[in-house]
Image (cartoon, rainbow, N blue to C red):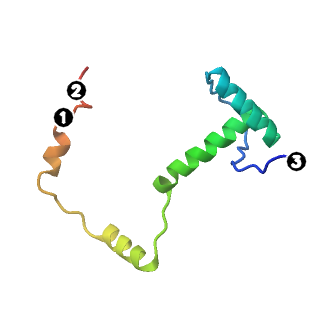
Amino acid sequence: MAAQRTYALVVGVKEERINLRVDGETKRLLESASEVAGDTVSSFVLGAATTAARELLADRTGFRLGEEQWRAFDMALSREPRDVPGLAELMRTPTLLDENP
């Protein structure tokens, strides 16, 4: 009996390629797991990686608010913009990321 799949299936035209290098132990692990899942290694790895990526990014792409929280959020978005002392200067100040190596 195949194990229940717990990852998202990716459907669509496959136009791009991702290459991975793994050690022998990791390859055997992925082959065993994909066999138990009744899937190819590529499909198993892609499904697991896609699910992990969606979970990681979920809080950055959408969020839920209760009614009171939504009203407060909506009010904050509706307020007129205001100057924050020193912000413009801070944004113009070079950081370590701006410096040439």
Q: Counting other residues with Cα less than 10 Å from the Cα at mark 1, is it few (<14), some (14-19), or many (20 or more)?
A: few
Marks 1,2: beta carbons within 8 A: yes
Residue 8, given in percent of the width and then of the height, sits at 69, 48
Q: Residue at x 37, y 70 (%)?
A: 73
Residue reaching furthest right? 1
Q: Counting other residues with Cα less than 10 Å from the Cα at mark 3, is it few (<14), some (14-19), or many (20 or more)?
A: few
Give whichever of discs 1 and 3 has the lower sequence position: 3
Q: Counting other residues with Cα less than 10 Å from the Cα at mark 2, is it few (<14), some (14-19), or many (20 or more)?
A: few
- The numbered disc on residue 99 is 2
Q: Residue at x 40, y 75 (%)?
A: 69
What secondary structure is found at the residue carrying circle 3?
loop
Q: Is residue 32 above or below residue 7?
A: above
Q: CA distance from mark 1 to mark 2?
A: 7 Å
What secondary structure is found at the residue carrying circle 1?
loop
Q: Residue at x 69, y 48 (%)?
A: 7
- The residue carrying mark 1 is 94
Q: Amino acid at mark 1?
A: Pro
Residue 20, given in percent of the width and then of the height, sits at 62, 24
- The numbered disc on residue 1 is 3
Residue 67, given in percent of the width and then of the height, sits at 45, 79
Give whichever of discs 1 and 2 has the lower sequence position: 1
Residue in the foreground of this view, choosing between 86 and 52: 52
Marks 2,3: beta carbons within 8 A: no
